[in-house]
Image: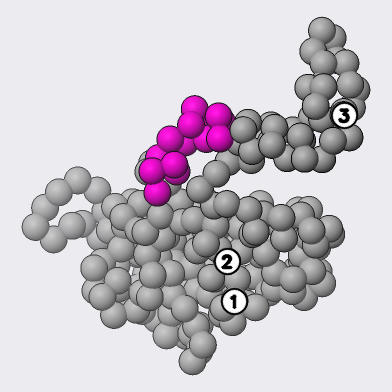
Amino acid sequence: MRIDIITLFPEIALSPLSESIIKRAREKDLVEIHAHNLRNWATGKHRKTDEYLCGGGQGMLLKPEPIFAAIEELRTNTSQVILMTPQGKPFKQATAQNLARADHLILLCGHYEGVDQRVIDTLVDLEISIGDYVLTNGAIAAAVVTDAIVRLLPGALGDERSHQDESFSDPNMLEAPAYTKPNLFRDMPVPEVLLSGNHKKIAEWKKQKALERTRANRPDLLKE
Ligand code: ADE
């Protein structure tokens, strides 16, 4: 798989993808990740990438010309072009699983008020939002999306089971609380059932606790 990130801040996108699991996935050639500065495709003395909004309004918008030039240069027959934007579809684990099967992703990062609509209408296959908040730039979102995809590539996680469990588990339920040693820390014991060796009881306890946690933290998931 290859991922190209187009942004005004390639270092912001790349730095979280240069450590730990994603770093090793790149070293093992499971994925090739490139971050490009949009300014490389801007023309004129000042290599301007942004412009005022037509019709007025606060802020600046990324101009279409450098974006068209960048994508026309980078895309192939198998590329999917994805725009990072708070106006996009919510990014879910299922989105990551779908995109992990792609051959080539081009992640286009918005900045300021976003990108010219003609880019979306003619170049973009999918608009993605990583959450209902506004970041200073899409490079942070691109790093998040890339991380979630690359860790799903076969061979990326040392212990293959670590995400097999995840993908079989219920996407509408959070995970149960988890404990490790020591069995007693300060005045806080590990719940007795987890030390009982009774796998049926442990499974029931986990299910119950997962439900309680989901009800408290993500009641929206239970409605889905
Ligand atoms: N750019 C700015 N905010 C964003 C968000 N929430 N998701 C994706 N891209 C963004």
Q: Quadrant of residue 87?
A: bottom left
What's the amino acid at mark 1?
A: Arg
Whether residues under marks 1 and 2 lie with C-beta atoms below 8 angstroms apart, the answer is yes
Look at the image and give the residue range highlighted in magenta. 211-224
Give the residue pinned by disc 3: 196
Q: Which mark is nearer the camera, 2 or 3?
A: 3
Q: Residue at x 84, y 9 (%)?
A: 186
Between the C-alphas of marks 2 and 3, the distance is 36 Å
Give the residue pinned by disc 1: 101
Q: Residue furthest top?
A: 187
Q: Main secondary structure of the magenta part?
A: helix
Q: Quadrant of residue 31?
A: bottom right
The local secondary structure at tag 2 comes to helix
Left or right of residue 12: residue 42 = left
- Is 132 rendered above or below residue 128? above
What's the amino acid at mark 3?
A: Ser
Q: Looking at the image, what colour scheme do you see?
A: one colour
Between the C-alphas of marks 1 and 3, the distance is 41 Å
Camera-side residue of 103 and 42: 103
Whether residues under marks 1 and 3 lie with C-beta atoms below 8 angstroms apart, the answer is no
**Count of all numbered marks drawn on residues in the image:** 3
For marks 1 and 3, the one nearer the N-term is: 1
Tell me where residue 188 appears, x and y as whole percent.
79, 13
- Is 198 rendered above or below residue 51? above
Q: Which mark is nearer the camera, 1 or 3?
A: 3
For marks 2 and 3, the one nearer the N-term is: 2
Whether residues under marks 2 and 3 lie with C-beta atoms below 8 angstroms apart, the answer is no
Give the residue pinned by disc 2: 97
Whether residue 139 is visible, yes or no, is: no
